Image (cartoon, rainbow, N blue to C red):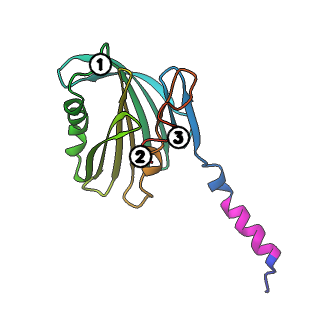
Amino acid sequence: MRVGPGITTVAVVLASLPALGQQWSDYINPEYRFRVNFPAEPAEQDAVYVSADGSSHAARAFSSEQDAGRYQVLVVQFPSDIADMAGEFDHAAAPYRQLGEVVYDQAGEYEDIDAYEINVIGPDGRQIYVSFAYHDRRLFIAEGSVGADAFPPIQFQQSLWITDAAGAPINGGRRLGN
């Protein structure tokens, strides 16, 4: 039986429909002052973050899952500016260093925003990409974690924008990591 080009096109379009439903979207949260690409609307929950000096701080976690991937932004509100930002980033990154082979571990700055990135490959091949940013007494931790055979979660990790109260990017319209 011979299949015509029209039937082949229809088959390709129908086969791609599930992928169309998995389109990532730009999630904007003016209250917590960030934007990020999530694969689905995130769930929200209260959290507690223990800082490098041992003090506890209220935090809010936003998380979404897709397939074997998990994506989360944790926003921590500090009562005053952090005196030792390098030490706080090192403290925040320390638990990730214990998860496997660290393939990237670097501090940086993006448009006057203190930032840090760490990428880890777990013993089972799981890929964990994390960005940290600090601005206006808020610590942002964006973590993407996917299975060994998945595309690295860099799309999530580097899609974080720090925003003003209206949801507009404060870092020159550039996402962290760009």
Per the image, label 2 sits on a secondary structure element best described as loop
Task: Find the magenta span and give its range.
Answer: 6-16
Does residue 30 appear left or right of residue 138 in this picture? right
Q: Which of marks 3 and 1 is in front?
A: 1
**The stretch drawn in magenta includes residue 152:** no
What amino acid is labelled 3 in the image? Answer: Phe
Mark sitting earlier along the chain (1/2): 1
**Mark 3 surroundings: few (<14), some (14-19) or many (≥20) residues within 10 A:** many
What amino acid is labelled 1 in the image? Answer: Asp
- Marks 3 and 2, how far apart in space? 16 Å
Per the image, label 3 sits on a secondary structure element best described as strand
**The stretch drawn in magenta includes residue 11:** yes
Q: Residue tagged by mark 1?
A: 81
**Mark 2 surroundings: few (<14), some (14-19) or many (≥20) residues within 10 A:** some
Per the image, label 1 sits on a secondary structure element best described as loop
- Marks 3 and 1, how far apart in space? 29 Å
Q: Residue tagged by mark 2?
A: 177
Mark sitting earlier along the chain (3/1): 3
Q: Residue extending furthest bottom?
A: 1
* Quadrant the N terminus occupies: bottom right
Residue 124: x percent and y percent? 28, 56
Q: Quadrant of residue 152?
A: bottom left
What amino acid is labelled 2 in the image? Answer: Gly
- Residue at the spot x=21%, y=45% of the render? 97
Does residue 61 appear left or right of residue 54 in this picture? right
